[in-house]
Image: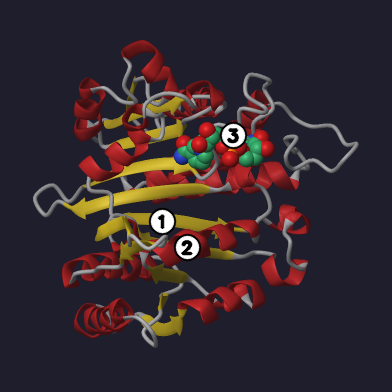
Amino acid sequence: MSPQKLLLLSGDGIGPEVMAEVERLIAWMNARKLGTFETEQALVGGACHDAHRVAVTEETMAKAHDADAVLFGAVGGSKWDGVPYEVRPEAALLRLRKDLGLFANLRPAICYPALAEASSLKRDLVDGLDIVIVRELTGGVYFGEPKTIVDLGNGQKRAVDTQVYDTFEIERIARVAFELARKRRNKVTSMEKRNVMKSGVLWNEVVSAVHAREFPDVTLEHQLADAGGMQLVRRPKQFDVIVTDNLFGDMLSDVAAMLTGSLGMLPSASLGELDARTGKRKALYEPVHGSAPDIAGKGLANPIAMLASFAMALRYSFGMVREADLVEQAIAATLERGLRTADLAAAGTPAAATTEMGEAVIKEMGRLAG
Ligand code: NAD
């Protein structure tokens, strides 16, 4: 097996703390011959700004292009509030997404049985929940032109954002969703607003065509995005894979996040186009949470979102399905045993440190792997 090349960009705040637990896991897997990972580190975000006055250097961008996958911690913090807009910490993430062509954002919402009480919904609605939202990430209303505010000269202003999608953009995101569903419970729900938006009409038409042509074995249903949002909090377990555009995906994935309890639990993947020659895609994996300046440097951060992001890298970049399952099962088993970082612990109960949680997950992996 050729080595798996990973670029680790830990960033700011709790980023380096949670990334350290992934490094611990990688070292353990290498030692156990469960992988042949080669890692490189680079500065990103505020840390990179401090050293180089940019959010990400050209050298790091070249490394990101060269890597099989990028693992990203988190960036940002009030220290960099005053830096110029183009070099603010978050600019690094946008540059990586754009230059690597990461058009598909996968956000799983998994509710571990041990944490069902932490959800804002009743236990029976979320216990065992396992869905994925596939959000289109590089098109739609966040990027469409014109995008402007014009002064109408009569004391009024007019703001314009443009929702625009071409056929190829919808086709490629639909394919990601259908392929993913085939490896899961074989169902895709596509969400748009075809009743009031032309982009919704085209979205519906193209998803249906890709389904009929390439994925007739997968169950496809369509829901209007507003009704879908309601169903997500009413009966979330009806879904397997949800595919939707950039704007609706932004909102629906945050709603789905709250079904699962803490921000410290949620991983994500951003994938690029499949290279027909190599069979590989550019990919970046990151926790959904930010740099959490309020708890940074205190050893309080929950590393599970970062560890689960690494599990997604195993699954989607390296085809290491068994190993990905092992990481996820070890996380579930660790929670089952009652270990909780401060974000998960009930008031007045003891909380585990970041390192303690990381070590416990590895210990469970060892036990499960035998
Ligand atoms: P945040 O996600 O950093 O924190 C929100 C709350 O959740 C905080 O109370 C924090 O302590 C808690 N939290 C987050 N992750 C946790 C974890 N792993 N374990 C335990 N608790 C956790 O969001 P914020 O406070 O709005 O933003 C802080 C900074 O992060 C800002 O500069 C923001 O721009 C940046 N940010 C970066 C990213 C990214 O790098 N992708 C994403 C979101 C926010």
Q: Give the amino acid type for the residue marked by disc 2 in the picture.
A: Val
Instruction: Quote the CA–CA distance across marks 2 and 3.
Output: 20 Å
Label 2, on which residue? Answer: 132
Question: Of 115 and 361, which appears nearest the observer?
Answer: 115
Instruction: Quote the CA–CA distance across marks 1 and 3.
Output: 19 Å
Q: Is mark 3 within 8 Å of ligand 1?
A: yes
The answer to whether residue 194 is left or right of residue 13 is left
Q: Quadrant of the C terminus?
A: top right
Q: Earlier in the sequence, mark 2 or mark 3?
A: 2
Residue that lies at the very extreme toward the left in this rendered image: 277
User: x and y percent of residue 286 in the render?
Assistant: 44, 40
Residues at discs 2 and 1 in contact (Cβ within 8 Å): yes
Question: Of 255 and 327, which appears nearest the observer?
Answer: 255
Q: Quadrant of residue 224?
A: bottom left
Label 3, on which residue? Answer: 303
Query: Which residue is at a point 73% across and 66% down the rendered structure image?
Result: 121
User: x and y percent of residue 225 in the render?
Assistant: 47, 77
Q: Earlier in the sequence, mark 1 or mark 3?
A: 1
Mark 2: secondary structure: strand
